[in-house]
Amino acid sequence: MFQLKHGAALIALCFAGAALAEDLPEFDGGDVVVTASGVPQARGVAPVSVSVITAQDIANSSARTVQEVMSQSSGVNVFNMGGANPSFDLHGFGITGISNTLVLVDGVRQSSNDLSAPDLSFIPLASIDRIEIVRGSGAVQYGSGATGGVINIITKAGYRAQNSAQITQTVGSFNLRQTDASFNLAGDRVSLDGYVQSMDTHHYRQNNAERRDGGGLGLNLKLDDGQVRIYARSSSDSLRLAGDRLVDPASATNEFDSNPTGTSTPNDYSFVKTDQVGLQGDQGFGVGRLYFQASTLSKRLDGWGGTAANHQVSSSDEGSLRYVLPLPAENKLTVGTDWLYGNATNAWSGGVPTSVKVRRQSLFAEAELGLWQGARVTVGGRSQRVDDLSKVAGVSYATQGELHAWQLGLRQRLGSNWSLFANQAQSFRLGKADEMSWSYGPLLPQLSHDQQMGIEWQLGLSSARANVFRSDLTNEIVYLPTPYLGYNVNLPKTRHEGIELEGRTRLAQTVGLHGSLTWQKSKFMEGVYNGTSLVGKQIPMVPQWMANAGVSWDVRESTSLSLDAQYVGTQYMDNDWGNQYTSKLSAYTVVNTKLTQQFTRQLSGSFSVNNLLNRHYANYGVTSWKGSGTGYAVYPADPRNFQASLTLKF
């Protein structure tokens, strides 16, 4: 286990390795990826599975949202319980997947200190430069919540020399109306960019209307040997909550088929207001480079669920410093510190308020070494001090101590087109404010030992990757639904493992193909639930098979057509820990298509159809305490629907 007292030995090893590697040839890593280490890093260096989705890939796909783009990559499962901001899972964590995957926008953490999915709806696809999905890595550089991996959405923000502006108007099914506008004003060393968004839709079901508004500004400064960006974002989302549809074979009830648009919760709603202000940048300092970022985020939630009103307020201040020291023979050492200070309160009408205080500070170091020809070794460790306090029903629970993460990985080039990678790591996750507020007793930190290995091939615009992964967890943190809200617990020992295949190519100059295949299994290694042994039982809401296939066709220079199909296999429903229900959440296949037309240099448009074959399906279900005990509840997904957009650039 890595500890701070071992830091000197680690740094000495880094310098010793650099001296041994001084005369080795230069290693060509390929595309730049920033998420694996928190600083610019060559894609061919990361000793883990990496997917880079470029702006061109996004333009060639049928995706309409960031989540739809990500779902076309191996291992990513997206599910929605109503609303325009669905949640997602990486590496088979089910409903808590979003708490085990760290989401960044331009390197800034978006996962707030609660269980809601980060709001990515404010990011127009046209503003994205690339999306980086780094699987099973990030705990050393980022700490808690990166066991599944790190997703970094890199936008086209930052200093740009040219002035520009654009506005997009979208209309669609379910009375969708959305306006997106953005601009960039540039000087010699200063630029200002901003965006606004307004969306209004009824969605597919009753009592499911949504109104979302947001905007942001960024000030970018070019320094002599660096850059600084100061930004502010604000958003509000008002969403009516339609609730579930009950299916109970024992009583011949099937609201999913007979009345999928109905609502079981006609009075439920939520309103979320989020504000974030921060700065980030880098500056040459001595022989190395200093990277820095700091932000403050506040969030307020008001809602009504069942028979009670809910009011939540949370705030967090976080930041980081990273210093990258170049070493001989193209090696480098990164040392850094980060911190998170947060507070949250949660109150239900008629209930006892809960409060959470989070105080976390960390030190970490990571080295990249070329110890022999064609190889890059990554070694690093983190020590994180934790001083959290939760107060539930008048009783205080403290989580204090020191947690550790480490990583040892290797990427080996095999000629000019092939490479092998292998990685061994330890990661951890601490409970979020929501989880700490709704638990019987303190939640123990989740600890995971992670292994990954694979092979990659790349030649021009064609690439392929195959990898296997396994994570063995102790005290995995999950939510157990009950008739009255539910609570969070630590599970017995669990294992998440799988195989992922992914590739893309182009046929001639006009046709592109991409596809992925995932087999995964998440299961209990020990434990008993309601008198039933859990050994070998599968964790709910984790499909064993997932697949994607897509084709894009440049019909002519100004016209393109894309078609994508996604398959998600059967899943045990949420809360079916003993795998005792005879019914599972059914498998489904969804086909989406989009036609894009460039009318002039300034005017473009698109027309998309999602769920082209009009499949009737649900991507989330939970065993129900309603009815006879054999029932379950599902959230119907959207039937066939349409969107049309026009974009005007200035």
Image (spheres, grey):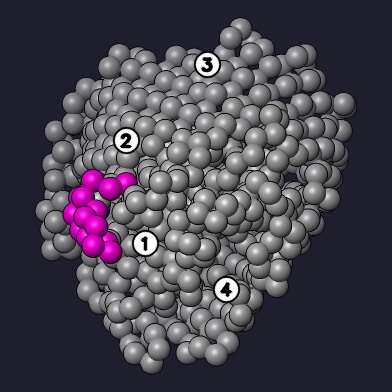
Sequence-wise first label, 2 or 3:
2
CA separation in Å, label 4 and label 2? 37 Å
Residue 19 marker: none
CA separation in Å, label 4 and label 3? 43 Å
CA separation in Å, label 1 and label 4? 25 Å
Q: Position of residue 42 (x, y in %)?
A: 40, 34
The amino acid type of the residue labelled 2 equals: Gly
Sequence-wise first label, 1 or 2:
1
Q: At numbered mark 2, what does the secondary structure look like: helix, strand or loop?
A: strand
- Between tags 1 and 3, which lies in front? 1
Instruction: From the image, tell me which residue sits under label 1.
Output: 478
- Between tags 1 and 4, which lies in front? 1
Q: Residue at x 51, y 88 (%)?
A: 351
Instruction: From the image, tell me which residue sits under label 2.
Output: 498
Which quadrant of the figure has residue 330? Answer: top left
CA separation in Å, label 1 and label 2? 20 Å
The outermost residue toward the bottom is 394
The amino acid type of the residue labelled 1 equals: Val
* Disc 3: CA contacts within 10 A as few (<14), some (14-19) or many (>=20): some
Task: Tell me the chief SS of the magenta region.
Answer: loop
Instruction: From the image, tell me which residue sits under label 3.
Output: 505
Q: Residue at x 56, y 78 (%)?
A: 312
Q: Residue at x 49, y 44 (%)?
A: 585
From where the camera sits, is residue 467 visible? yes
Assess whether residue 8 is covered by the magenta stretch: no
The amino acid type of the residue labelled 4 equals: Ser
The amino acid type of the residue labelled 3 equals: Thr
| Above/below status of 151 relative to 263 | above
Image marks 4 and 3: residues in contact by CB distance under 8 Å: no
